[in-house]
Image: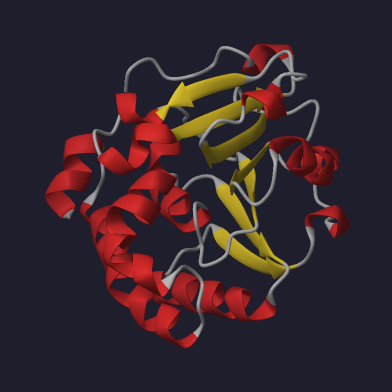
Amino acid sequence: MKSVLLEHFPNLSEVQLNQLFTFAQIFPEWNDKINCISRKDIENLFVNHILHSLSIAKLFYFPEGTVIADIGTGGGFPGIPLAIMFPDAEFDLVDSIGKKIIVVKSIIEKLKLNNVSAKCSRAESLPEKYDVVVSRAVTSFPKFYQLVHHIIRKNAKSDINGIIYLKGGDFSNEISKFKKIQVYNIIEHMKYDYFETKKIIYLPINKKSEIKVLNNQ
């Protein structure tokens, strides 16, 4: 696992590698108690969930001070892997199901992640303002936009400012009305069959954030 992580992210520190490894080790035990992801899929945890979350880091960089909300985090995806990847950014992991937030809080404590908080809340009830909202396909993209657009800062200092959404399948009709939207194929950056139909959707909010995507990291 560590060698694969370094293949994709050669600048990971030993601390980050150990945190990701520990996350992969402790998550199945929690998942047996509280079903955060399908128990049938737990053997695919590394690729289907950890690497899938980290695919965002192949295209986007969150500098120090960036404030990110992971909406519908479930068991901490994509928020926990991204928080490990970007220790100088701040993450709020949000889910409306309290028992999942209990899991996330326990994992955060175990991994000693000081840049993460977990909140039991619905997105529409959040008062905070964020530079970026991330999520893994909790609903159709238009519905998700309606849930979260009000919590995104419109004058963020970060070059990345908007919604980053992990989604698979054919969703062309869903995004046809969003003129600035950008779609990226994960398979071009991570060569696993699972990513064949998986995409990263990015909807920038301000003009300077429209083209600030990493080139072939």
From the viewer's perspective, tell me whether residue 11 is left or right of residue 57: left
Q: How many marks?
A: 0
Q: Give the answer, above or below, for where 206 lies relative to 49.
A: above
Expressed as whole percent of the image width and height from the top left, the position of residue 45 reads 32, 61
Q: Give the answer, above or below, for where 113 lies relative to 123.
A: below
Expressed as whole percent of the image width and height from the top left, the position of residue 197 reads 42, 34
Residue at horizontal 79%, vertical 62%? 122
Dividing the picture into quarters, in which one does residue 210 lie? top right
Residue at horizontal 27%, vertical 39%? 193
Q: Give the answer, above or below, for where 215 lies relative to 76.
A: above
Dividing the picture into quarters, in which one does residue 57 lie? top left
Expressed as whole percent of the image width and height from the top left, the position of residue 144 reads 74, 43
Dividing the picture into quarters, in which one does residue 162 lie? top right
Residue at horizontal 40%, vertical 74%? 39
Expressed as whole percent of the image width and height from the top left, the position of residue 73 reads 59, 59
Residue 48 visible to an observer of this rendering: yes
Nearest the eye: 174 or 25? 174
Residue 10 visible to an observer of this rendering: no
From the viewer's perspective, tell me whether residue 161 is left or right of residue 113: right
**Quarter occupied by the C terminus:** top left
From the viewer's perspective, tell me whether residue 213 is left or right of residue 40: right
**Quarter occupied by the N terminus:** bottom left
Q: List the single residue furthest toward the left.
A: 3
Residue at horizontal 66%, vertical 34%? 163
